[in-house]
Amino acid sequence: MEIEWKNKKRVRKGLDPILPLYTAEEALKCLEVFCPVKYDDIIDIDENIHVRFNDAGHMLGSAIIEIWAYENGKRTKAVFTGDLGNNDIPLLSEPTMIEDADYLVMESTYGGRLHNRDENKATEFLRIVSETLDKGGTVVIPSFAVGRTQEILYELNQLKEIIQDEDFRKKYETLMKVPVYVDSPLAISATEIFKDNMELFDEQTQEIMRSGDNPLEFPGLQFTRTAEESKKLNAKNESSIIISASGMCEVGRIKHHLKHNLWNPNSTILFVGYQAPGTLGRKIVDGAKTVKLFGEEIAVNARIEYIEGYSGHADQEWLLNFIYSFITKPKTVFLVHGEPEGQVILKQKIQGTTEIPVIIPEYGEQYELNEEVERLGRVKGTKQREKQYIRLEVLGRIQTLKEELEDMSTIVKEEMLNEDANDGEIEKLNDKIKELEQQIVRIVEG
């Protein structure tokens, strides 16, 4: 769909169309090589390698994998966590604790942070939504198609169970009067898969289901599959809640909903998941005054909210608890999948509390797992791939710089060059812009 949209623009410009990375037919064909496995079953790859998948609690079907390898009469066991789940995610079970490992490769997304233990996130969610609806606005929730969307649906359904007082009841009744749209084909398909695999839910959710309540269904919930149905949402003159992907606002239908709601002070953009640096979602959360969508400058006048309690990743405390839970501790921990600062903080915490050696490997590095872990250097071809990555990074930084200069231009015009502006401050700003201009000239000339 993205390529189809891009090609329409390319054709209008007289450019040749570009090919998609893969077709729908190819995506379906690849399913022939998939083999489903159950949690807790030991699978023999061959006589020397055995694996077992365990519930990682991050999203439906996410897995920690244990690997036993026999070589020269010696058994070595490695554990790869994948993404570990936050321990209080509704619907899903908590991550499985592993008893022993020789080596642990662990994610570190929130290695330097603790989540806000917001026991009242549902109440906070209802407050934000009801205040927006009272103003006649729309609540737009950029949500990850698999995991966060289903969690929000669960929370909306469960609000009726925690009604505390008359004020809460009124807010809940306001919520139930407006339509809730899930506007993402992938999120809709994922929700159906959740419904088909309810035996994987945590015990509390299964108990709710046994009482006859489906936690992913409630009055007012509507699913919009087609692009035409999606477009109609922004043409309707009604308050509503729109849950749409992508969660970081980079691609998909969410960009259209942002275009139609970011400028509106009565609407709210409610973020419920991690926003990576450089993404459109991160810029909005960080307070951008304007953003560019489909080539158009859009003012950010809407209310911007972020409820961190919906994160699907374990924070520093639970990452450490995962290591503490080993009966036989690993000899070495490798930290991957995290931002550098957070990885360093987590490394210091692990070594300070367990004295287990911790390695933060660089891209393409190889290690031999003997009694002492030995670094063998980098995989052949890594430098070439790094060169390609650096080239892409340069282009990305230039694009980011371009967008930031546009943001700066807007802010300067609107906030710095008005009649009440301080002349001294404007002179300082002028000097800084001259300095920036000279730096850019030096780069170009060089």
Image: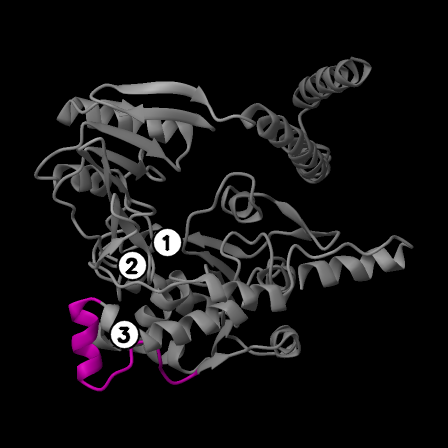
Q: Secondary structure at mark 1?
A: loop
Q: Amino acid at mark 3?
A: Met
Q: Is residue 271 above or below residue 134?
A: above
In this figure, which residue is indicated by the disc labeled 3? 198
Q: Earlier in the sequence, mark 3 or mark 1?
A: 3
Q: Earlier in the sequence, mark 1 or mark 2?
A: 2
Closest to the camera, between mark 2 and mark 3, is 3
Point out the stretch of residues depicted in magenta: 202-220
Q: Amino acid at mark 2?
A: Lys
Give the left or right position of residue 180, taking residue 411 as reference.
Answer: left
Mark 2, Cα crowd under 10 Å, few <14 / some 14-19 / many 20+, is some
Q: Secondary structure at mark 2?
A: helix
Is disc 1 in contact with disc 2, using a CB cutoff of under 8 Å?
A: yes
Q: Is residue 361 shown to the viewer in this render? A: no
Q: Residue at x 66, y 25 (%)?
A: 422
In this figure, which residue is indicated by the disc labeled 2? 121
Quarter of the image with the C terminus in it: top right
In this figure, which residue is indicated by the disc labeled 1? 307
